[in-house]
């Protein structure tokens, strides 16, 4: 199930941003995820204030060369993956 | 054009064994015990950084679990490292590239300085997993741990029913664990329930899931016992039957689907039933470093059973020096030590020939192919062990066995 556009994702307990050798990471229980440019832009906005819709609009602006449709799809897919990892909670 | 968000190489698994029928990339053994880390990184010619530090803070423990992964020879309190030495070790670990520390034991909460240790590891920049039985915990202590920077607590359960749990742990411990679960609701920390699975509790998975669903946990680990240490001694009474195992795998596949996005289920099968061995510790000296209560640095939990290996101590040397130069870490790093069939096998970069300690325990040679591998010359020995378990009259499997309980060191 893709996350709802008007929900506000935030990092679940025990999930936080970290850094090692200048590489930004999402640290989670017993695992870690390397963050590249766009994934970092997304995770930084999972703060309980931005809605999924706002995250999409922001990223469409930043990555204006990419097709807006495709950006939306990618973001929804990425958020669903983080949810499956139990790294996110969504508030309505 | 799409924006590249996700690539499998970016997921860093931090777990020490995985013998998966399901997507078990995880492992852990013993009781509240250990977790380590597996990484999906490609082989590099240079020595990779360690990614996880398994800090065995003490061997003291109020429980006596029959599968405890601690060595048969336990360290006493007088040999334990001081707060200062551990604090230095955490700094050196973070500098060497370690991301996470797993506080384990024994029971890590038996250390009176546990809150200071959490604070020290967190200020060194590490992510902290605490693996505990929950016995020496009260709510004030819990609040202090979270305040000091604890990220993730793994509460071990010996079963879903009081009776089984108390039998396996040799103590009355179950009720206290249920109290801890209630307190955890009020604190911001990730919670995993760890169940160590074996013949006596593998039929209770549904009850364990129900217990987890009624709690605030977001993860559950079903780790079948792996046979080293105390578990090796109690193996005949712990190995599940094939019917039990197949049933549990089917059940968990369904439950993983049902609970997707809500609770993450990790499952580790007993590798005696697997076709190929687990990539033990994610490869010897590739990802993990274990420090014993007295400061010896080991490439894996059970490495002390291997004759002829000598270990360096963090009191004498820096972590990086040990990681890069210690003979014990070099011994089975890379492929030069491999025998046939591993030496020319296509899977050698995936499982690294399996577990060295298991090779020693079952084949009498730490450099042999792990005998649980279906290609290993000694696989018939493992098949023999399984045959004995599976043909025994089923009633006999369920009478109360005579356990060898793990004692509590001074
Ligand atoms: S006896 Fe203690 S250290 Fe060993 S498995 Fe049980 S709880 Fe863990
Ligand atoms: S022969 Fe060795 S490398 Fe090949 S699958 Fe078996 S244990 Fe792994």
Image (cartoon, grey):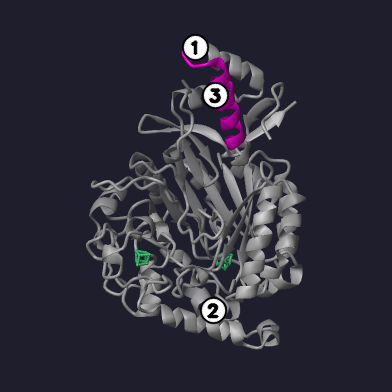
**Quick one: quadrant of the C terminus of chain A?**
top right
- Residue B294, picture quadrant: bottom left
Quadrant of the picture in which ligand 2 is shown: bottom left
Contact check, label 2 and label 1, Cβ < 8 Å: no
Cβ of mark 1 under 8 Å from ligand 2: the answer is: no
Which residue is rendered at x = 49% and y = 68% of the image? B274
Q: Position of residue A78 (x, y in %)?
A: 56, 31
**Quick one: quadrant of the N terminus of chain A?**
top right
- The crowd level at tag 1 (other Cα within 10 Å; few <14, some 14-19, many 20+) is few
Query: Of the residues tagged 3 and 1, which is closer to the observer?
Result: 1
Give the mark nearer the N terminus: 3 vs 1. 3
Q: Position of residue B382 (x, y in %)?
A: 46, 79
**Nearer to us in this view, B343 or B61:** B343
The answer to whether tags 3 and 2 share a subunit is: no
Q: Chain of mark 2?
A: B
- The crowd level at tag 3 (other Cα within 10 Å; few <14, some 14-19, many 20+) is many
- Per the model, the C-alpha gap separating discs 2 and 1 is 60 Å
The magenta stretch spans which residues? A62-82
Give the residue number, with chain letter if any, for mark 2.
B235
- Per the model, the C-alpha gap separating discs 3 and 1 is 15 Å
- Per the model, the C-alpha gap separating discs 3 and 2 is 48 Å
Give the residue number, with chain letter if any, for mark 3.
A42
Q: Does the magenta stretch mainly form a helix, a strand or a loop?
A: helix
Which residue is rendered at x = 62% and y = 69% of the image? B245
């Amino acid at each position: 199930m893709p996350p709802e556009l008007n929900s506000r994702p935030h990092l679940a307990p025990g999930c936080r941003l970290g850094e090692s050798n200048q590489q930004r990471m999402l640290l989670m229980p017993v695992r870690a995820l390397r963050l590249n440019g766009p994934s970092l832009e997304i995770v930084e906005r999972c703060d309980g204030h931005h809605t999924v819709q706002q995250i999409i609009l922001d990223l469409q602006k930043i990555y204006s060369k990419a097709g807006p449709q495709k950006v939306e799809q990618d973001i929804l897919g990425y958020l669903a993956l983080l949810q499956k990892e139990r790294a996110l909670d969504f508030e309505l | 054009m799409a924006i590249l968000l996700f690539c499998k190489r970016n997921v860093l698994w931090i777990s020490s064994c995985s013998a998966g029928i399901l997507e078990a990339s995880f492992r852990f053994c013993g009781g509240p015990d250990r977790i380590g880390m597996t990484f999906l990184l490609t082989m590099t010619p240079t020595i990779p950084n360690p990614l996880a530090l398994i800090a065995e803070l003490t061997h003291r423990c109020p429980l006596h679990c029959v599968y405890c992964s601690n060595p048969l020879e336990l360290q006493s309190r007088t040999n334990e490292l001081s707060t200062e030495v551990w604090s230095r070790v955490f700094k050196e670990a973070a500098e060497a590239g370690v991301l996470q520390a797993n506080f384990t034991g024994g029971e890590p909460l038996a250390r009176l300085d546990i809150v200071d240790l959490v604070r020290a590891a967190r200020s060194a920049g590490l992510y902290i997993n605490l693996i505990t039985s929950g016995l020496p915990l009260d709510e004030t202590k819990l609040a202090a741990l979270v305040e000091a920077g604890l990220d993730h607590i793994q509460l071990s359960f010996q079963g879903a029913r009081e009776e089984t749990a108390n039998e396996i742990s040799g103590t009355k411990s179950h009720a206290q664990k249920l109290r801890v679960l209630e307190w955890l609701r009020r604190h911001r920390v990730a919670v995993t329930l760890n169940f160590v699975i074996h013949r006596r509790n593998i039929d209770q998975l549904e009850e364990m899931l129900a217990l987890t669903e009624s709690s605030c946990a977001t993860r559950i680990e079903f780790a079948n016992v792996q046979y080293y240490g105390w578990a090796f001694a109690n193996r005949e009474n712990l190995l599940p039957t094939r019917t039990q195992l197949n049933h549990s795998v089917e059940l968990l596949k369904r439950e993983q689907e049902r609970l997707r996005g809500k609770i993450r289920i990790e499952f580790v099968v007993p590798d005696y039933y697997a076709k190929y061995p687990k990539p033990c510790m994610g490869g010897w000296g590739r990802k993990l470093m274990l420090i014993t209560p007295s400061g010896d640095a080991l490439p894996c939990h059970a490495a002390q059973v291997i004759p002829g290996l000598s270990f360096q101590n963090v009191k004498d040397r820096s972590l990086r020096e040990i990681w890069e130069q210690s003979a014990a870490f070099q011994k089975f790093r890379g492929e030069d030590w491999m025998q046939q069939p591993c030496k020319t096998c296509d899977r050698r970069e995936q499982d690294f020939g399996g577990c060295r300690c298991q090779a020693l325990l079952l084949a009498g040679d730490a450099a042999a192919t792990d005998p649980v591998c279906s290609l290993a010359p000694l696989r018939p020995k493992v098949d023999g062990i399984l045959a004995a378990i599976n043909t025994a009259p089923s009633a006999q499997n369920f009478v109360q066995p005579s356990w060898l309980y793990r004692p509590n060191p001074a």
